[in-house]
Image (cartoon, helix red, strand yellow):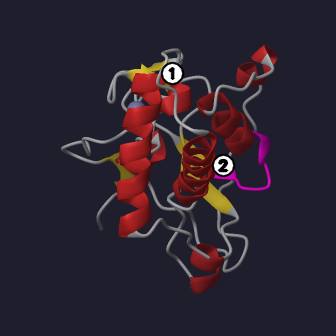
Amino acid sequence: MTIALTPAERAQLTDLSARYKESRGTDHELDQASENLYWSLFRLREIELLCTAPTPACCEAARTHPAILYDIASSVNAPGEDPGRWYLATHSKHTQARASFRSGGWIECRWAEVEPPSPKFCPYCGAALPAMRLKDPLPRNICNSGGEDWCETCDSRLRDCLCDLPWSAFEPEPG
Ligand SMILES: [Zn+2]
Ligand SMILES: [Zn+2]
């Protein structure tokens, strides 16, 4: 199932995000209701982002029940610095670590060294996983932090970043 913000929610999130960043630490902080709304929309955006993971397109099950996702190493977070590879979705610490990193949480620092084995075929239909490549040109709205706590694309802390995830930079090789 794919979860996405409505156009109205997206506009509201963009607006609240700008106001929240501007007002934090000043005398004009957001009122509690606006801040709560901001965070609930931000969480929705995070779920939306998880739903954008590239999955194999070999069969309907692979798309509707993602078991395998294409991503880059959790310690990189910059498209182009890592060729990316397929990960088992059951290895959910990978996405959890990235999600908590993006929202300002602490990641076990040894985690980045533990790269799980890469799957080779679709568990539903047995098809080999497609070769993937970086999109050319790269989409503009992709989070790029190089593993630091700052997104170069939107020029803000990762906890405020609303950009697409680096895995959005990948597509199947044609042919
Ligand atoms: Zn399949
Ligand atoms: Zn960003």
Callout 1: SS: loop
Q: Is residue 112 left or right of residue 49?
A: right
Quarter of image, ligand 2: top left
Q: Could you tell me residue 18's position as x and y percent?
A: 37, 35
Q: Which quadrant of the structure image shows residue 81?
A: top left
Quadrant where the N terminus is found in the figure:
bottom right
Q: Could you tell me residue 141's position as x and y percent?
A: 31, 42
Pick whichever, 6 or 31, lies toward us.
31
Q: Could you tell me residue 51's position as x and y percent?
A: 56, 62
Query: Magenta residues, as a range?
Result: 87-93
| Residue type beneath disc 1 | Arg
Q: State the residue position of label 2.
A: 87
Query: Residue at the spot x=44%, y=62% of the render?
Result: 9
Query: Residue at the spot x=58%, y=50% of the render?
Result: 46
Extreme bottom residue here?
Answer: 60
Pick whichever, 136 or 46, lies toward us.
46
Q: Could you tell me residue 25's position as x and y percent?
A: 53, 15
What is the tally of numbered marks visible in this picture?
2
Q: Which quadrant of the structure image shows residue 100?
A: top right
Quadrant where the C terminus is found in the figure:
bottom left
Sequence-wise first label, 2 or 1: 1
Q: Residues within 10 Å of mark 2 (few under 14, many from 20)?
A: many
Q: Which disc, if any, is residue 24?
A: 1
In the image, residue 90 lies in the stretch drawn in magenta:
yes
Query: Is residue 116 placed above or below 14 in the rendered structure?
Result: above
Query: Is residue 116 placed above or below 58 in the rendered structure?
Result: above
